[in-house]
Amino acid sequence: MEFYGTLGPSCCRYSVLSKMYETGMTGVRLNLSHGMLEEHANWIYLAVSAAGALGIKTKILLDLQGPELRVGTMAGNRQLKSESDVIFGARGIPVPQILLEQGRKGMKLLLDDGKLEVEVRECNGRQIIGRVIRGGILKSRKSIAVEGAGIDSPTLTQQDRDNLKLARKYGVTGVMLPFVRNRQDIICLKQVLEEEQLKDIKIFAKIENTAGVNALSDFLSEVDEVVIARGDLGNAIPLWKLPAVQKMLSKQCRDANIPFMVVTQMLDSMEHHPVPTRAEVSDIYNAVLDGASSLMLTGETAVGEYPEEAMTYLVKTAREAMSEMSI
């Protein structure tokens, strides 16, 4: 089984990464929604060096920006108060132009993996004026999802294409494509990989919207691994339906003999606590019993206070489940 940690300021120290590999981590993820590959070259160097010293050849996954929507860079954090109005776009919170153009009255915008919710009241192509339904602190580069709808975005951004040109240089072993909607998204990525002579790099298709859920059978044979990415997927469907969808996707992958990864909030409480909840370790255990071939931590290792401990709990819990399966 593969165990991935997301690179970030909390874990990107040689001593911390060494301990994470010692406890069982087999690879790392670099989230390119937060910057270019070259900007984080030192993080990759540290991971490769720490793994190499232990005789481990680490896997390196690039998580592309893809057709994902994110808040732009702001001067500071913004407090969005429930029942107040907020402006996106001109003289407001920066968002992608495509969202301003395709925004419609009544749309529900889910920010930062659904922690905040805004209902669109007015839009004119330059601005969106919304009413805050569920408030909180909004930070730069946080995700935006449209509840129950999609925004027609290109499969790959220019930033994605520029990053892929450098994949070989930095020893990348896999590429994660977010918000896969159909087979054509996978074909588009494959074409770019072939153009850059990167056909040996594995393709990880992230299922994060209803389009991806519905089209999975059409592109399963085109990918090396499926990623059940529960953050945005939990925004796209009612949250109480998410477990059933996860089970369904897991079964489809098992039946097709395609490996799959489970990710997002595996040990979310460990961003600020040294011990996980009972529900979290049960979640990990059940993902393994469902047949997951990979598990990944995100914020827990990237920005959390206990990256080493989080990886330890992930690996030990998964291995306990694996031992149960072998009986």
Image (cartoon, rainbow, N blue to C red):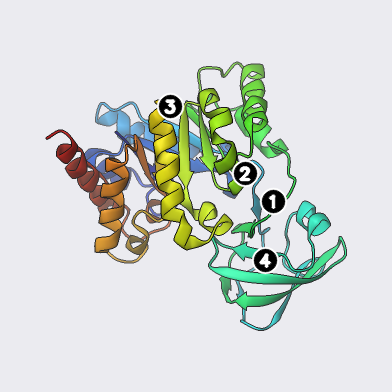
Q: Position of residue 215 (x, y in %)?
A: 59, 36
- Sort mark 3 into few (<14), some (14-19) or many (20+) by Cα contacts within 10 Å: few
- Sort mark 2 into few (<14), some (14-19) or many (20+) by Cα contacts within 10 Å: some
For disc 3, the marked residue is 256
Q: Are marks 2 and 1 in contact (CB under 8 Å)?
A: yes
Q: Alpha-carbon distance for marks 3 and 4?
A: 35 Å
Q: Are marks 4 and 2 in contact (CB under 8 Å)?
A: no
Q: Are marks 3 and 4 in contact (CB under 8 Å)?
A: no
Residue type at numbered disc 1: Gly
Disc nearer the start of the sequence (3/1): 1
Q: Position of residue 307 (x, y in %)?
A: 32, 53
Q: Nearer the viewer, residue 197 or 224?
A: 224
Q: Residue at x 32, y 41 (%)?
A: 290
Disc nearer the start of the sequence (2/1): 1
Horizontal relation, residue 97 to residue 297: left or right: right
Q: Nearer the viewer, mark 3 or mark 1?
A: 3
For disc 4, the marked residue is 108
Image quarter where the C terminus lies is top left
Q: Is residue 110 above or below residue 186?
A: below
